[in-house]
Amino acid sequence: MNISGNTIFIPGATSGIGLALALALQARGNTLIVGGRRTDLLDKIAAEHPGIDTVQIDTTDPASIDAAAKQVLAKHPELNVLVTMAGIMRVEDWRQPESFLASAEAVVTTNVLGPIRLIAAFIEHLRAQPDATLVTVSSGLAFAPLRPPRATTRRRPRSTCSASRSGCSSPTRP
Ligand SMILES: NC(=O)c1ccc[n+]([C@@H]2O[C@H](COP(=O)([O-])OP(=O)(O)OC[C@H]3O[C@@H](n4cnc5c(N)ncnc54)[C@H](OP(=O)(O)O)[C@@H]3O)[C@@H](O)[C@H]2O)c1
């Protein structure tokens, strides 16, 4: 991937690694579109960083992904890079279903279904670009999993977060 001259959409860049990456890539001469759910942060980013475009998106919601994709591609038909940054990390204790099940479902919906749905929304457009790049975000947790606190059994289940990170690194692994 060329490091400059791209038009890049990063859903999951209102804070943290995504925002830092967006600012670093803008400084290298790329056009950036930042996505996320928090409109106050999107407005702040647009005000503080002229040239960065923003779009509201909830990557757990297929309708929101479709709407955001249409908005981004209508305004930036030259888009050639998608970074599926949006993700959550939760510590779970699988010995207590009442505490882990809702969390596990949210992790799978955000960290696995989110990138898959984003790829589905953008892949036809990206394949038509002369120099396109698709970036998924994994984690060291895929290889060094989180353990529940005070775990006592010898064979403890990996957290959903670790499993989800193994899963979402697969689509773009060479
Ligand atoms: N921090 C680490 O050590 C680490 C290590 C390895 C991998 N990662 C991964 O790297 C990515 C960024 O991590 P981070 O530490 O920078 O996290 P963060 O500061 O919590 O940022 C997460 C970003 O994802 C967005 N997001 C979360 N759920 C979303 C949803 N449903 N729809 C749209 N956007 C959503 C958030 O925006 P809104 O809240 O505005 O929607 C925010 O911009 C995550 O995927 C994380 O799992 C982090």
Image (cartoon, helix red, strand yellow):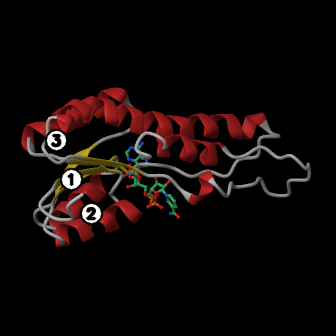
Q: Disc 1 designates what residue? A: 8
Q: Residues within 10 Å of mark 3 (few under 14, many from 20)?
A: many
Tell whether circle 3 marks a residue whose Cβ is less than 8 angstroms from ligand 1.
Answer: no
Q: Disc 2 designates what residue? A: 22
Q: Is tag 3's residue or tag 1's residue first in the polypeptide sequence?
A: 1
Q: Residue at x 13, y 68 (%)?
A: 29
Q: Residues within 10 Å of mark 1 (few under 14, many from 20)?
A: many
The reply to whether the C-beta atoms of the residues labelled 2 and 1 are less than 8 Å apart is yes
152 left or right, relative to 102: right
Residue 15 seen anywhere in this rendered image of the structure:
no
Callout 1, which amino acid? Ile
Secondary structure under tag 3 reads helix
Q: CA distance from mark 3 to mark 1?
A: 10 Å
- Toward the viewer: 99 or 138? 138
Q: Residue at x 44, y 52 (%)?
A: 137
Callout 2, which amino acid? Ala
Secondary structure under tag 2 reads helix
Q: Disc 3 designates what residue? A: 72
Callout 3, which amino acid? Val
122 left or right, relative to 52: right
The reply to whether the C-beta atoms of the residues labelled 3 and 2 are less than 8 Å apart is no
